[in-house]
Image (tube, helix red, strand yellow):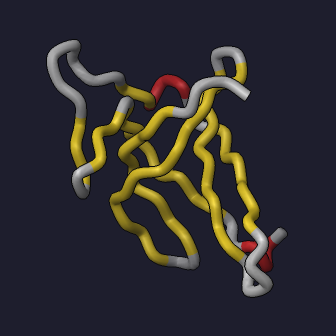
Amino acid sequence: MGRIYKILTAAQYEGAISLGVCDMEFEGAIPFAIHTYYEREGHCSKQRIELDPLKLQAPRKTSKWKFGGVECDFFYQGLVVFPTPRDN
């Protein structure tokens, strides 16, 4: 596994769309959003969603995006749709 980045994006989960921060990693030149969720039994599961690299924007050299006190490495100009665990 490579370096984990923070991205600011609009995300849809269980029908609700919100602006938020999630983890992202690259596999070669392909970016993947990573969503971690916890099941009722206390198990941790992760989902990887492939992102369109053309919609990924890096910040200017002098500043990063901040959201909720978290500095983000990238801004994704698209909608990330995370499937609910029961859809898998």
Left or right of 11? Residue 61 is left
Residue shown at 46% from the left, 76% from the top? 16
| 33 over 57 or under it: above or below | below
| 83 over 32 or under it: above or below | below
Residue shown at 56% from the left, 33% from the top? 4
Q: Nearer the viewer, residue 37 or 16?
A: 37
Q: Residue furthest front?
A: 42
| 41 over 13 or under it: above or below | below
Q: Residue furthest right?
A: 88
Q: Nearer the viewer, residue 11 or 41?
A: 41
- Residue 59 lies, in percent from the top left, at 27, 23
- Residue 83 lies, in percent from the top left, at 68, 66
Residue shown at 23% from the left, 52% from the top? 69
- Residue 87 lies, in percent from the top left, at 79, 74
Quadrant of the snapshot with the N terminus: top right
| 17 over 61 or under it: above or below | below
Q: Residue furthest left?
A: 62
Q: Quadrant of residue 63?
A: top left
- Residue 21 lies, in percent from the top left, at 40, 52
Left or right of 52? Residue 37 is right
Q: Residue furthest bottom?
A: 40
Residue shown at 48% from the left, 50% from the top? 22
Quadrant of the snapshot with the C terminus: bottom right
Q: Nearer the viewer, residue 36 or 77?
A: 36
Left or right of 54? Residue 28 is right
Instruction: Please count the marks in the image.
Output: 0
Q: Quadrant of residue 40?
A: bottom right
